[in-house]
Image (cartoon, rainbow, N blue to C red):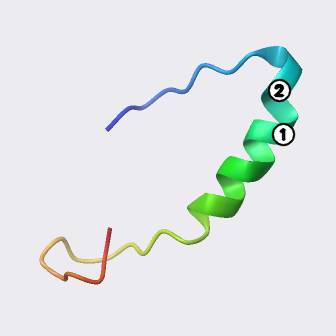
């Protein structure tokens, strides 16, 4: 997994908004649980 994302200044705000929206859907939990990511 990457720990950094390089984004051009011109699209930064749009990128952050879209990335945050997608991150809300990540299911965190036990690695052995198939329902988690």
* Label 1 environment density (alpha carbons within 10 Å; few <14, some 14–19, many ≥20): few
Q: Is residue 26 left or right of residue 29?
A: right
Q: Is residue 33 left or right of residue 6?
A: left
| Proximity of marks 2 and 1: CB atoms separated by less than 8 Å | yes
Tell me what residue is drawn at x 31 percent, y 76 percent.
36
* Label 2 environment density (alpha carbons within 10 Å; few <14, some 14–19, many ≥20): few
Q: Which mark is drawn over residue 14?
A: 1
Residue 17 locus on image (x, y percent): 79, 49
Q: Secondary structure at mark 2?
A: helix
Q: Secondary structure at mark 1?
A: helix
Relative to the observer, which residue lies in front, 12 or 28?
12
Residue 34 locus on image (x, y percent): 20, 81
Tell me what residue is drawn at x 18 percent, y 71 percent.
31
Tell me what residue is drawn at x 80 percent, y 28 percent.
12
Q: Quadrant of residue 23?
A: bottom right
Which residue in the protein does label 2 denote?
Answer: 11
Tell me what residue is drawn at x 70 percent, y 61 percent.
21
Q: Quadrant of residue 5?
A: top right
Q: From the viewer's perspective, is residue 29 above or below residue 18?
A: below
Q: Residue furthest left?
A: 32
Q: Quadrant of residue 24?
A: bottom right
Q: From the viewer's perspective, is residue 33 above or below residue 24?
A: below
Q: Which mark is drawn over residue 5?
A: none
Q: From the viewer's perspective, is residue 12 above or below residue 22?
A: above
């Amino acid at each position: 997994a990457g720990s950094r994302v390089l984004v051009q200044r011109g699209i930064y705000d749009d990128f952050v908004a879209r990335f945050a929206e997608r991150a809300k859907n990540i299911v965190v939990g036990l690695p052995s649980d198939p329902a988690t990511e």
